[in-house]
Amino acid sequence: MLNDIQETLYDAEQIQQKVRELAENISRDFEGRNPLVICVLKGAFIFMADLVKNVSIPLEIDFMAVSSYGQSTKSSGVVKIIKDLDVSVEGRDVLIVEDIIDSGLTLSYLIDVLERRNAKSVTVVTLFDKPARRTVELDADYTGFTLPDEFVVGYGLDYAEKYRNLPYIGILKPEVYTKS
Ligand code: 5GP
Ligand code: MG
Ligand code: MG
């Protein structure tokens, strides 16, 4: 598995440091608001867990699963809700926790859904961002790392459901997804 990684971009320690920083900013900005924190499955599950452990204010969590990629490395542009929230977002301050923003299609769809359900506010934190590939104009309120235009895996992010368990983020060797 390690042989499939071309280059490590950020190691486990660098990621933890950044996650703590994001959590501090969120704790400060959401003071007194009891946000509903939404983990976008599956990619954000590790980030979500590390993040909320470092947030010092009361909050609630829920999970949503959306799909836009299938087994490919590029977005199909069609977003589907695979698993919806258990609780209502009406009147809630919502914090969407994303793993990575690429085209921005998934996130713009999610924000739209939550706003139509009358969330009081919708804020976005993403650990990774690939702004070079945006097709819709949109930025997260909190961003961990800005990445080059490469397909990355690890720390929750997969290729064909593999590599999510790597504690670091790395670039997958192109031959891994070009060979059939
Ligand atoms: P978008 O809709 O912004 O194009 O893509 C969002 C989703 O696509 C992310 O939440 C993530 O699940 C997946 N994705 C985008 N770029 C990458 C990448 O470089 N590596 C992996 N593993 N997934 C990605
Ligand atoms: Mg995601
Ligand atoms: Mg994926």
Image: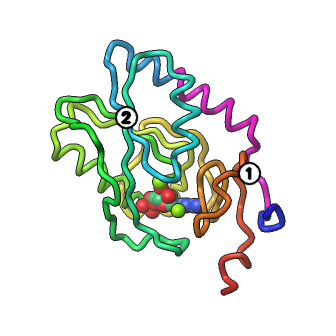
Residue 23 within the segment the image draws in magenta: yes
Residue 55 location in percent, x, y? 51, 22
The residue at 18%/29% (across/down) is: 91
User: In terms of secondary structure, what is the magenta stretch mainly?
Assistant: helix
Image: 11 above or below 4: above
Residue 74 location in percent, x, y? 50, 72
Q: Name the residue under label 2.
A: 95
The residue at 37%/53% (across/down) is: 107
Q: Mark 1 points at which residue?
A: 9
Residue 29 within the segment the image draws in magenta: no
Residue 48 location in percent, x, y? 51, 38
Q: Which of marks 1 and 2 is in front?
A: 2
Q: Label for residue 128?
A: none
The residue at 65%/58% (across/down) is: 153
* Range covered by the magenta-colored residues: 7-24
Amino acid type shown at disc 1: Leu
The mark that comes first in sequence, 1 or 2, is 1
Q: In which quarter of the image is residue 21?
A: top right
Local secondary structure at mark 1: strand
Image: 64 above or below 141: below
Q: In this view, does 27 lie to the left or right of 106?
A: right
Q: Quadrant of residue 57?
A: top left
- Asked whether residue 28 is in view, the answer is yes
